[in-house]
């Protein structure tokens, strides 16, 4: 289930419409319904509160003003783990990888 801080892609009529970040989820006054605060990522950024059931938050289709809407959680790319931080001289010293670095520093290039 998507939760606070997750990025979701909103589909309208089975076409991707926009991205939003879930800012908050809290219980609504109606049983089994939730107020989902969304930060809609467009220009300009817009905040909206949708009142949804848990199954709609989980990706089931619902209608809004006659249009079929669906939320899909977006998984981010995995970030590579860093073995160590760059040293003060700007080189990145990794154990066992020192000879495999092909990074050329633009700041250390010799000027003609």
Image (cartoon, grey):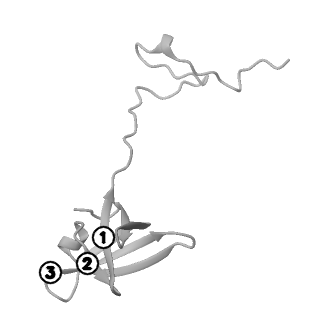
Left or right side of 20 for 3: left
Give the camera-side residue of 106 and 70.
70
Q: How many marks?
A: 3
* First-in-chain label (2 vs 3): 3
Q: Which mark is residue 70?
A: 1
Residue 10 pos. (x, y %): 37, 68
User: How far from the left and from the top, in percent, is residue 87?
Assistant: 54, 24
Question: Tag 1's secondary structure?
Answer: strand
The C terminus sits in image quarter? top right
Q: Calculate the distance from the C-alpha at mark 2 to the C-alpha at mark 3.
A: 15 Å
- Few, some or many residues within 10 Å of mark 3 (<14, 14–19, 20+): few
> Circle 1: is it few (<14), some (14-19), or many (20+) Cα within 10 Å?
many
**How far apart are the alpha carbons under marks 3 and 1?**
18 Å
- Camera-nearest label, 2 or 3: 2
Q: CA distance from mark 1 to mark 2?
A: 7 Å
Q: Are marks 1 and 2 in contact (CB under 8 Å)?
A: yes
- Residue drawn 65% across and 24% down? 105
SS for callout 2:
strand
Earlier residue among tags 3 and 1 = 3
Q: Which residue is mark 3?
A: 32
Instruction: Name the residue at 36% across, 81% down.
Output: 49
Mark with earlier residue (1, 2) = 2
Which residue: 57% across, 73% down? 44
Most extreme residue toward the right is 112
Q: Find disc 2 in the rendering and name its residue.
A: 62
């Amino acid at each position: 289930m998507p939760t606070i801080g997750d990025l979701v892609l909103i589909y309208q009529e089975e076409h991707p419409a926009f991205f939003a970040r879930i800012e908050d989820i809290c219980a609504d006054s109606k049983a089994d319904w939730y107020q989902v605060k969304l930060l809609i990522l467009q220009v300009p950024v817009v905040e909206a509160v949708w009142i949804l059931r848990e199954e709609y938050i989980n990706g089931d289709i619902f209608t809004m003003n006659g249009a079929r809407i669906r939320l899909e959680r977006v998984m981010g790319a995995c970030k590579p783990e860093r073995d160590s931080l760059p040293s003060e001289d700007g080189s990145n010293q990794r154990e066992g990888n020192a000879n495999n670095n092909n990074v050329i520093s633009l700041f250390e290039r010799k000027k003609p």
